[in-house]
């Protein structure tokens, strides 16, 4: 297995088509098909089910998807560091990001940005939305990829660029897994794994709001900061959680995800945050690239909006 094969695998996953993936990679379709077959031979299992309607992941393909996305993300980090060392570039773009941005957003945009702006050194730092906004205000970061909407007042301008929806994560064999869709009110008596009140304020506020709109306040038994941690705790069987649907892609854990019926909005997003005065900077160019290259798989993306969030708004 090599990085080129991983790139080809992810291109087929994102476009759901060998033809479209070949066009994206600027190669002919036969070499792409050969590369995927070699990857499948190396792994000892088929990764795609092929039909006239297109392709979809097999169980083996879903098993490796998240790791492949992480490898692509970290490979771009390494490439950026090598380019900086070789060329001695002076420009540096400091980007803070929440963990969910590594599912698709960063692997999709980083290669494009590095190709177009090879003299910009990318300094990537993982954190929470609250901490990233504070670092932006203090000038310690140039741009942030954060959870949206934001429940705290901030002078930072935030634009949602990748929309998603909340779904419920249930332990395997939970009675509600027998349903295709779960009414939010059906979760009233469940133990909830909740986002941290101190470190994940924004998602916590939204989950609390939609639950209270459904007529109940969640009975919180455990708190966590990262979405991935919430899913792991659901897997352990100690409760349920409302999480962005994107985290269910390729999940191999003993967790079931179900759509939720709710009167309140379940829309969430990843937003790009930066100082209003950053126009013309590398941060502004990175934001423009995010807006010009939305996700191609529309399963979880609800819509695109370009209107900036007013300062200090929820």
Image (cartoon, rainbow, N blue to C red):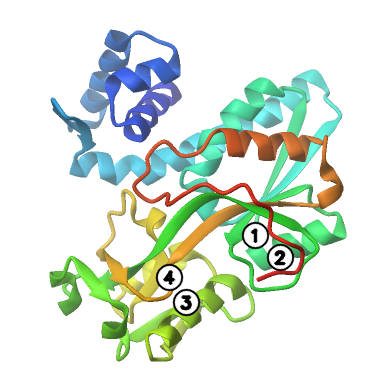
Q: Is residue 210 left or right of residue 308?
A: left
Q: Position of residue 122 (x, y in %)?
A: 72, 36
Q: Are marks 2 and 4 in contact (CB under 8 Å)?
A: no
Give the labeled residue for mark 1: 127
Name the quadrant of the C terminus. bottom right
The answer to which of marks 2 and 3 sits earlier in the sequence is 2
Label 1 CA crowd tier, 10 Å (few <14, some 14–19, many 20+): many
The answer to which of marks 2 and 4 sits earlier in the sequence is 2
Please report the residue visible at 41 percent of the width from the left and 66 percent of the height from the top. 243
The answer to which of marks 1 and 3 sits earlier in the sequence is 1
* Distance from the alpha carbon under mark 2 to that under mark 4: 19 Å
Residue 40 shows which numbered tag?
none
Give the labeled residue for mark 4: 230
Give the answer, above or below, for where 154 lies relative to 97.
Answer: below
Label 3: which secondary element? helix
Label 4 CA crowd tier, 10 Å (few <14, some 14–19, many 20+): many
Label 4: which secondary element? helix
Q: Position of residue 90 (x, y in %)?
A: 86, 29
Label 1: which secondary element? loop
Q: Are marks 2 and 3 in contact (CB under 8 Å)?
A: no
Give the labeled residue for mark 2: 131
Q: Are marks 2 and 1 in contact (CB under 8 Å)?
A: yes
Count numbered badges in the picture: 4
* Distance from the alpha carbon under mark 4 to that under mark 3: 13 Å
Residue 207 shows which numbered tag?
3
* Distance from the alpha carbon under mark 1 to that under mark 3: 20 Å
Q: Tell us which disc is closer to us: 4 or 3.
A: 3
* Distance from the alpha carbon under mark 2 to that under mark 3: 20 Å
Label 2: which secondary element? helix
């Amino acid at each position: 297995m090599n990085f080129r094969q991983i790139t080809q695998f992810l291109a087929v996953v994102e476009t759901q088509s060998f033809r479209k993936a070949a066009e994206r990679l600027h190669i002919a379709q036969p070499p792409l098909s050969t590369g995927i077959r070699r990857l499948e031979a190396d792994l000892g299992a088929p990764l795609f089910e092929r039909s006239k309607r297109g392709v979809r992941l097999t169980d083996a393909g879903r098993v490796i998807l998240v790791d492949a996305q992480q490898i692509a993300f970290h490979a771009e980090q390494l490439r950026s560091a090598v380019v900086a060392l070789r060329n001695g570039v002076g420009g540096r773009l400091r980007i803070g990001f929440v963990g969910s941005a590594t599912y698709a957003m960063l692997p999709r945009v980083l290669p494009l940005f590095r190709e177009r702006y090879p003299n910009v050194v990318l300094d990537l730092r993982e954190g929470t939305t609250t901490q990233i906004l504070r670092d932006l205000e203090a000038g310690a970061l140039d741009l942030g990829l954060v959870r949206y909407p934001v429940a705290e007042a901030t002078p930072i301008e935030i634009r949602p660029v990748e929309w998603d929806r909340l779904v419920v994560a249930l332990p395997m064999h939970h009675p509600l897994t027998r349903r295709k869709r779960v009414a939010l009110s059906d979760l009233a008596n469940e133990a909830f794994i909740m986002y941290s009140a101190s470190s994940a304020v924004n998602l916590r506020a939204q989950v609390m709001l939609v639950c209270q709109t459904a007529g109940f306040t969640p009975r919180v038994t455990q708190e966590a900061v990262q979405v991935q941690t919430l899913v792991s705790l659901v897997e352990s069987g100690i409760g349920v959680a409302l999480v962005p649907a994107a985290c269910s892609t390729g999940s191999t854990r003993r967790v079931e995800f179900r759509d939720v019926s709710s009167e309140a909005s379940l829309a969430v997003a990843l937003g790009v945050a930066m100082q209003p005065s950053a126009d013309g900077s590398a941060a502004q160019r990175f934001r423009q690239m995010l807006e010009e290259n939305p996700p191609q798989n529309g399963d979880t993306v609800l819509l695109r909006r370009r209107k900036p969030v007013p300062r200090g708004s929820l």
